[in-house]
Amino acid sequence: MRKACLFTIAVAALSLLGIAQEADCTFSGVLGMEFAFIPTPPTTLEVETTITLGLSFAGASVESRTVLSLDGLEAEHIQFGVELGGVTLTTGMRFDPCFSKYWFEVRGGCCPFDLGALFLVENLAPPCQTPDFTVGIVLDLGLAFDSGFFVRSLTGFGVEELYSLIDEDPATDLIAVAGWWFEEELIHLGFATECLRTESIFVFDDLGFAWAQFYASYTWQEPIIEIGARVWLSSVFAFDQADFILGFAIDPVRLRSTISFDWLGFLSQEIDISIEFSGIRLYSRTRFDFTGLISVTIGFELSF
């Protein structure tokens, strides 16, 4: 299965390269690798390696994300996309390490409207066991205005964790559940300018209101300094968690710190550092709490 995945990626990459050369299109891509070190008490250290590859030209793209551990292949994510006259079609598969998920997404619209739909088929059984497939759908409706105001609605049927679609974290994903009925509704609205950004997120499930998040940040230019805060409220509108965000950038170095706390005090802190030069980005991400180190991630990205 692993060889089949790598063969598929190689064929897709060569096909894209050949078409791009024939059409005299600009060819671009990104190659990255990261290593995550996760201490497991009392003395065990888990190590995960993630390899990413992205190729694009003339509106078409292919992306691969491979996760390896000391035990071998953990997961393989493959995604293909194409843009046709303002409509974007994207499809992808996941193997962990056997086939576990297929999804297809279509997006398009006319300003200020943005419409989308995602359909997925996922295996609920343990990896490489007798499959137990289920299906899910996400309906996506958005509005964005030149003034900076935006609003977005995500409705999930047969899927949970809609927040993973907007958190911009490649390690998070939708979670499929058995059945074909309403599971979650996420409403995301806010206002964004070059310096100021405010957001509100409300999530509802089949039992009603689930949680809310409020975020605000301000960014000064030259040098870039970011100050922000994020607050979570529970299903009873009680304070659940808060983040304080502080970041700055002086080319080619960027530093960002996120401190999380609740009513009892300090929860955890994450420190992100990156250096960019000549199409290369080196980065590290360190997380720890009051008990000690949670994880350390180091990696690089090469753009071409």
Image: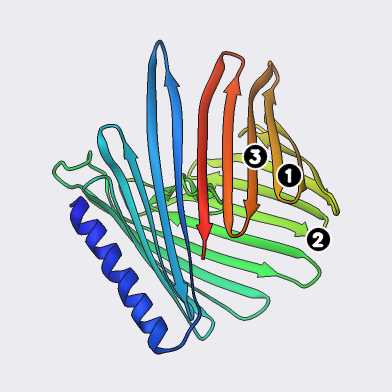
Q: Tell which circle, 2 or 3, labels the residue nearer the N-terminal end.
A: 2
**Residue at left offset 45%, top offset 29%:** 37
The amino acid type found where label 2 is placed reads Glu
The residue beneath circle 3 is: 273
- On the image, the x and y values in percent for residue 93 come to 31, 58
- On the image, the x and y values in percent for residue 157 come to 41, 55
The relative height of residue 114 versus residue 303 in the rendered view (above or below) is: below
Q: Tell which circle, 2 or 1, labels the residue nearer the N-terminal end.
A: 2
- On the image, the x and y values in percent for residue 33 come to 44, 47
The residue beneath circle 2 is: 194
- Looking at the rendered structure, the secondary structure element under dot 2 is loop
Q: Separation of disc 2 and disc 3 at Cα?
A: 22 Å
Foreground pick, 182 / 99: 99
**Residue at left offset 58%, top offset 43%:** 283
Q: Which of label 2 and label 3 is nearer to you?
A: 3
Q: Tell which circle, 3 or 1, labels the residue nearer the N-terminal end.
A: 1
Q: Which mark is residue 215?
A: 1
- With 53 as the anchor, is 210 left or right in this view? right
The relative height of residue 60 versus residue 299 in the rendered view (above or below) is: below
